Amino acid sequence: MFIGGLSWQTSPESLRDYFSKFGEISEVMVMKDPTTRRSRGFGFITFADPSSVDKVLSHGTHELDGKKIDPKVAFPRRAHPKITDTTGT
C-alpha cells in the first residue's frame, strides 16, 4: 500500500505499529530524501495477507502522528507489463 500525507516525524516503526492492527506486515518503508535524510511524507506497507488491504480501506479516516494520512492500493513496478511496439516503427 502507498501511504501518503505522513508527518515528517513518522518513522517506519510508528507506521508499522499503526497498521499492524489490520494484519501482519511483511515490509514497511518511509521514503526519505537521499541528501537531507528527511522524510518525503510518504511510504509503503506490504501486508502478508492481501485481505488486510481491504480492512485498511474500509476503515475510513486514518490519523498518525497528528496528521490525516491517505492509504491507497499500490502495485509493484515489476507487476506492470512493459508495452512494446510490435508495429516495427
Image (cartoon, grey):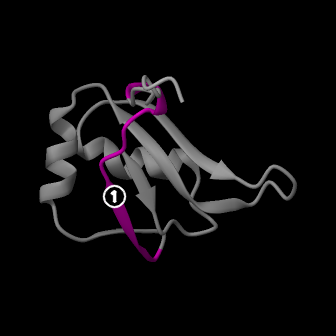
* Whole-percent x, y for residue 19 in the image: 33, 48
Question: Is 78 situated above or below 55?
Answer: above
- Which residues lie in the magenta part? 66-79
Q: Quadrant of residue 74?
A: top left
- Residue 82 drawn at (x, y percent): 45, 27
Tell me which amino acid carries mark 1. Answer: Pro
Between 70 and 65, the residue placed more toward the observer is 70
Residue 16: x and y in percent read 43, 44
- Reply yes or no: does residue 71 show up in magenta: yes
Q: Which quadrant of the figure contains the N terminus?
A: top left
77 over 41 or under it: above or below: above
Residue drawn 34% across the image and 58% down it: 71
What is the x, y in percent for residue 81?
A: 39, 26
7 w.r.t. 81: above or below: below
Q: Quadrant of the C terminus?
A: top right
Q: For label 1, count other residues whose C-alpha is less than 10 Å away and answer few (under 14), some (14-19) or many (20+).
A: many
Judged left or right of residue 82, residue 32 is: right
Identify the residue shown where x is 20% and y is 39%. 52
**Drawn side of residue 78 relative to residue 53, left or right:** right
**Is residue 69 located in the magenta-colored stretch of the structure?**
yes
Q: Which residue appears at 12% of the width and 57% of the height?
A: 58
Residues 77 and 85: in front is 85
Taking the image as shown, residue 79 lies to the left or right of residue 32, namely: left
Which quadrant of the structure image shows residue 25?
top left
28 left or right of 35 in image: left
- Which residue is drawn at the image coordinates 22% and 43% (left, top)? 53
Q: In the structure shown, which secondary structural element does the residue marked by tag 1 occupy?
A: strand
What residue sits right under mark 1 in the picture?
71
Residues 13 and 34: in front is 34
Tally of marks: 1
